[in-house]
Image: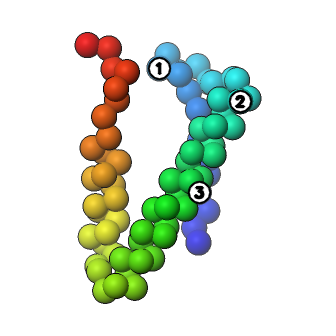
Amino acid sequence: MKNFEIPTWVQPDGQPVTCIEKIKVLNENLEELREIAQDALEDAILMGCDEKQVRSVLAELLASLDNPYKKV
């Protein structure tokens, strides 16, 4: 498994997030997403799907997420 480096979380103004609890939640969420995506990739490959397509679909899924808090 490739190493994945947890990012330094930043605010919209570029300043780092410094609240330890917020960082903990963000990192836990990222790890959960990684585990689910890994399981989905493995399942798809075992069922005969093209790995490149599955990775593309997963990337498109992430890109399609909406920000419900976006200022209009």
C-alpha span from label 3 to label 2: 21 Å
- Report whether residue 8 is seen: no
Quadrant where the C terminus sits is top left
Identify the image quadrant of residue 23: top right
Q: Which residue is mark 2?
A: 21
**Residue visible at 29% across and 80% down?**
49
Along the horizontal axis of the image, is 61 left or right of 28? Answer: left
Display colour scheme: rainbow
Which amino acid type corresponds to the residue marked 2 in the rendered image? Glu
Q: Which residue is mark 1?
A: 12
- How busy is the neighbourhood of tag 2: few (under 14 within 10 Å), some, or many (20 plus)? few
**Residue visible at 49% across and 16% down?**
13
| Comes first in the chain, label 3 or label 1 | 3
Front residue of 1 and 67 = 67
| Comes first in the chain, label 2 or label 1 | 1
Which amino acid type corresponds to the residue marked 3 in the rendered image? Phe
**Residue visible at 42% across and 69% down?**
40
C-alpha span from label 2 to label 1: 18 Å
**Compared to 56, does 30 lie above or below?**
above
Q: Which residue is mark 3?
A: 4
**Residue visible at 57% across and 45% down?**
29
Circles 3 and 1 in contact, beta carbons < 8 Å: no
Q: Secondary structure at mark 3?
A: loop
Along the horizontal axis of the image, is 45 left or right of 12? Answer: left
- Of badges 2 and 1, the one in the foreground is 2
